[in-house]
Amino acid sequence: MYVVTVLGGFSFLLPPLMLYVSYYHYTPKVKRQEKDSLKGLLTIGFLAFFWIIVGILLERKSILNIYIYIFSLYFGIINIIRYNASHLTELTGNKLNKKLIFISIIKALLFFIINYAILLKSIDLKIILENIVFLIAGILLYTIFIDKIPKNFFKNSHGGEKKVFFTTIIVFICSLLLLIIEYI
């Protein structure tokens, strides 16, 4: 958090701080949850750090939009992961929980809108609509691809490290595509 604030300023501190607080208070509770792994937390932090560096190199303040997006998408996907852990279920082709996906999308959108309103203080309908589409796409990609990975791949993963790595790949790809679309 210190490095994020030094490099990006207060604006870049709010989304990870909100994710940290929201993660515990606004996602399903998991009994006997393992502590979060340092590797998992560093993975999320590394992606945030990456986008701050990209923003500095490109000299773009609009990178804050993508920065907010990545934490919003993480929040939506974490909601799915914690729901599945608390109900001891996994997403499977025939049992895709549409209500859970809808709730996770709504939570991700609210997370984005709150951060966007506080930090950007302006309304750019094009950016908001792009983010809505990419949040929905990111959560759907996660739910589709998680079903394709063998279930034993994630077993014995301390603190859900493998799921965090997998989630980070999806978040990175979606955020990169969002950047490309913004440049077009």
Image (spheres, grey):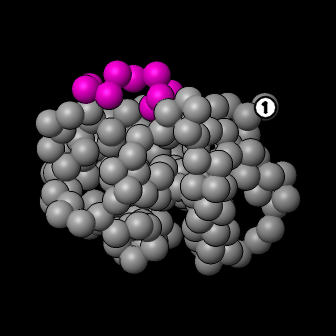
Q: Image point 50% across, 33% down: which residue?
A: 92
Secondary structure beneath dot 1 equals: loop
Percent position (x, y) of residue 80? 47, 52
Q: Which residues are magenta?
A: 145-153
Number of dots carrying numbers: 1
Does residue 131 belong to the magenta stretch?
A: no
Task: Point out the image quarter for the N terminus.
Answer: bottom left
Q: Which residue is mark 1?
A: 184
Q: Residue furthest front?
A: 94
Looking at the picture, does residue 4 appear above or below residue 98? below
Looking at the picture, does residue 163 appear above or below residue 110? above
Percent position (x, y) of residue 11? 50, 69
Residue 24 visible, this orientation: yes
Camera-side residue of 146 and 107: 146
Residue 105 visible, this orientation: no
Q: Amino acid at mark 1?
A: Ile
Task: Point out the image quarter for the C terminus.
Answer: top right
Q: Image point 16% across, 57% down: which residue?
A: 34
Camera-side residue of 153 and 120: 153
Q: Image point 23% across, 41% down: which residue?
A: 161
Q: Image point 39% across, 46% down: which residue?
A: 89
Percent position (x, y) of residue 142? 52, 36
Q: Is residue 96 left or right of residue 45?
A: right
Q: Is residue 30 left or right of residue 120?
A: left
Q: Residue furthest right?
A: 125
Does residue 151 belong to the magenta stretch?
A: yes
Mark 1, other Cα within 10 Å: few <14 / some 14–19 / many ≥20: few
Camera-side residue of 159 and 33: 33
